Image (cartoon, helix red, strand yellow):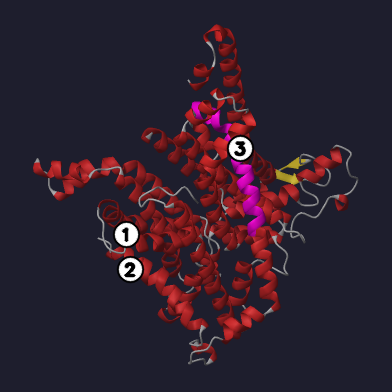
Amino acid sequence: MGLLKICPHSNWGKAHLILKTRRISAGLAVAATASAAFFPILLLAIWSFAQRWFWPALLPSGYSPRAWLYLASPVSAVNPAMAASLWIAIAVTLISLAVALPAARVLAWYDFPGKRAFFFLLLLPVIAPPLASAMGVHGLFLRLGLTETVTGVILVHLIPAVPYTILMLTGSFTRFHPDWEAQARTLGAGTLSVFRYVTLPAIAPGLAVAAVFAFLISWSQYLFTVLIGGGQVQTLPLILVSFQRGGDEAITAALALVFLAPTLVAFAVTAKFMRNHA
Amino acid sequence: MLAPALLVLMGLFAGGVVLALLQSTGFFAPIGEHSLTLTHYAAMLQNREFQLSLFLTTGIAAIATALSAATGLALALALRRAAGRWPVLNSLIQVPIAVPHLVMAVLLINVISQSGLLARIAYAAGLLSSPNEFPVLVNDRYSVGIIAAYVLKESPFIAVVTLAMLARIGGEYEELAATLGASRWQRLRHVTFPLVAPAVVSASVIVFAFIFGAFEVPFLLGRSYPSMLGVVAQRRFTSIDLTERPDAIALSVLMSIITAALVWAYLRFARIQIGERPTLF
């Protein structure tokens, strides 16, 4: 405890008091941060159940489950959009992981000429989603019949998702020593069992976090889906925007909550794995 | 081992940029262009909407980045001791980072618009009598809504990066300064700030590059004219007038070049190690 080093011994009582108030203020900081992080969710929940909420009422004057019933009803466009969003995001996650795993291994363990350039290339689409790439491949996709298709949308989502997954997994592999695999092999393990019993358990936390983020990158994509899907591939963010533009606040809020749900699940998963890791 | 990754990176990402370059330099068949020309770039650079948009985009990115850096730094210093005791704080603070931009925009519309929650609280407090008296903060002249959305999302990011840096540095330097008689402000000014500055600056470069290429937030919270560059590019690309498309692509290529320059600067500045986990989303 750094504080005690500074405090003279004659002041033990005072130091103890300082520690105690510090503990209380730290607790307050946690409470404040938690409420700041989750207050918006409460707001969205109230909005989604508001039936009448005229100016200047602070709370709705009537509540109804209309928005949620609409979301669940088979006639709404929400169900197919949610299915499309899920299917696209799962496909993007699986492809990203399959592509990123071998690449991350190489990047973490081996040096090769042009490694820095490759790393630069990886960072570009992560930092700002490349509008130029999406617009560039649009013409090609048009010729291949991939525009306005789910396949085309999956492919264009890979542009930001794959580099991100590679960067995250590279981090996991740098903490894992190649010799561990070699040791398992000298003990007679085959390639598959080395991966299954040695590599996989070691990188599992990183793998889970990378999968979650690849999913989220695809799930929250709006612009790339519009550009390549041409409005024919309707995903959740597209529906959200059209309800927001249409001015239906209750349905917009309910959709925003559904849209936010995987993010919160992802947050819980990441927090758990990060804690186990530390 | 790298082949599948290269296929995606070279085929889709770099290939896309090359195709974009071709289509913006006069090889756009649908409108009968088949020879090298830089007219689309020249037209874009001379275009009044582009100039206004570039000015607006740079301004918004600069202001939002500066505010995020200041808020994030203050947040990190305030939460520093608590974060050491409760690691869960490090996770909690990341919630806004993970909130999709569209959700953040929807929330802001409901909170800071003229009939939003803030205006209602102001009414309840007797500060105003009608919604019109509340300042226009959404789709407004000064882009307050856009800047607010990014400060809310990016200051936690700066705080996370700063907290990680503070944890790595430890408290010894500040304690040493304290034993030498440095006041609280002197310790902050001459010990803590210089130590965390590289982390804050490199994170700010990323934030700037990210806001520079923004789309969703200005799409929902911005004015229709002038708009941020991403919105202009998208609008021109999806216009029914096909002759606008090469201009849109030229604009997106210009944006890529600016982003690439920023990322390069970031790498030079941060001297980031390969394999270091990027904490951005």
Q: Compare residues B50 and B30 and report the one nearer the observer.
A: B50
Q: Compare residues B232 and B114 and report the one nearer the observer.
A: B232
Q: How many marks?
A: 3
Mark 1 to mark 3 CA distance (whole Å) = 46 Å
Describe residue B114's horizontal placement relative to residue B276 as left or right.
right
Residue B189 circle label? 3
Q: Does label 2 lie on the same chain as label 1?
A: no
- Where residue B66 appears, as percent x and y from the top left, is 64, 51
At label 1, counting other C-alpha atoms closer than 10 Å, the crowd grade (few under 14, some 14-19, many 20 or more) is many
Q: Amino acid at mark 1?
A: Val
At 80% from the left and 50% from the top, the residue drawn is B115
Q: Quadrant of residue A120?
A: bottom left
Look at the numbered discs 1 and 2 and tell me whether their residues touch, using CB distance below 8 Å. Answer: yes
Q: Locate the C terminus of chain A by quadrant.
A: top left
Q: Amino acid at mark 2?
A: Leu
Q: Amino acid at mark 3?
A: Arg
Which residue is identified by label 1?
A: A99
Q: Earlier in the sequence, mark 3 or mark 2?
A: 2
Which residue is identified by label 2?
A: B7
- Where residue B149 appears, as percent x and y from the top left, is 65, 51
Q: What's the magenta region?
A: B61-85
